[in-house]
Amino acid sequence: MELEKLEKNIGYTFKNKELLKKALRHTSYANERNLESNEKLEFLGDSILEFLTSKYIYENYKYLKEGEMTKVRATVVCGKSLSKIAKLHNFSDFLYMGKSEQKMSGAKRPAILEDSVEAIIAAIYLDGGLEQAERFIVENLKEEIKEATKHVGDKDYKTVLQEKLQEHGDVKIEYRTIGESGPDHDKTFEVDVEVNGKFLAKGKGKSKKEAQMKAAKRALENLN
């Protein structure tokens, strides 16, 4: 009955329930009972995740260049995103953990949660095929991918500005937070960028990093 709840959470019903159980079986639990852990499923799931994420980006964001697609994928296929999926579907409630890991609340550890998502992806693939694995990945990552594509260009502005300013020798580039407004849950930051103490441009964003990128972009526009 418990596993049925997890199946409902992830939107997939397994034909082979043992495959699902293995995907949830941490090494600590498997070693105590001389069973196979989910490690090999993690290995397979990692490759499936990268391939299907690449496929989705390629098919849905055709305007991105190869390097930009790589950056989007790297942003999305990471521990933070996988932990988010595991927490969304309450994976920690269903993991089989050994006694030592239980005492240390191992089921809540990000690394274990990340591994369990990869194992589940592999289990879905083996049980229902590539299409079902793709559906799970897309449903859980499409918003993360969409958000990552919005900022993929921004990631180069600070580097480009640095390279441009250092063409004729070393310079000191400094980003200063000069203001912030709004409530704690929805702040806006304002940052300026200076070179050797000389003001170049300002930028605003919902994070200091975003504001720095906007300032760098504006500085490049001004220099050009």
Image (spheres, grey):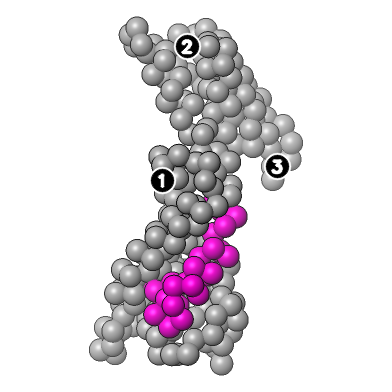
Q: Where is residue 165 shown, x and y percent of the image?
A: 42, 13
Disc with the residue nearer the chain's start (2 vs 1): 1
Q: Nearer the viewer, residue 198 or 137?
A: 137
User: Is residue 53 in the magenta section?
Assistant: no
Residue 139 inside the magenta-drawn segment: yes
Q: Residue at x 45, y 45 (%)?
A: 69
Main secondary structure type of the part rendered in magenta: helix
In space, the residues marked 2 and 3 are separated at their CA atoms by 30 Å
Q: Secondary structure at mark 3?
A: helix
Dot 2: element = strand
Q: Residues within 10 Å of mark 2 (few under 14, many from 20)?
A: some
Residue 29 image point, x, y percent: 34, 83
Q: Amino acid at mark 2?
A: Val
Report x, y in % for residue 54. Answer: 43, 55
- Whether pointer 2 and pointer 1 mark residues with C-beta atoms closer than 8 Å, the reply is no
Q: Residues within 10 Å of mark 1 (few under 14, many from 20)?
A: some
Pointers 3 and 1 in contact (C-beta within 8 Å)? no
Q: CA distance from mark 3 to mark 1?
A: 30 Å
State the CA–CA distance, disc 2 to disc 1.
31 Å
What are the residue bounds of the magenta stretch? 119-145
Question: Between 99 and 85, which is closer to the camera in this rendering?
Answer: 85
Of the two numbered discs 2 and 1 in the rendering, the one whose residue sits closer to the viewer = 1
Residue indicated by mark 1: 70
Residue 134 visible from this viewpoint: yes
Amino acid at pointer 3? Asp
Residue 186: mark in rendering: 3
Residue 16's image quarter? bottom left
| Number of the front mark, 3 or 1 | 1
In the rendered view, does 139 fall on the left or right side of 100? right
Kindly identify which numbered label has been placed on residue 195. Answer: 2
At horizontal 40% and vertical 85% (from top left) the residue drawn is 19
In the displayed structure, 152 sits above or below 223; it is below
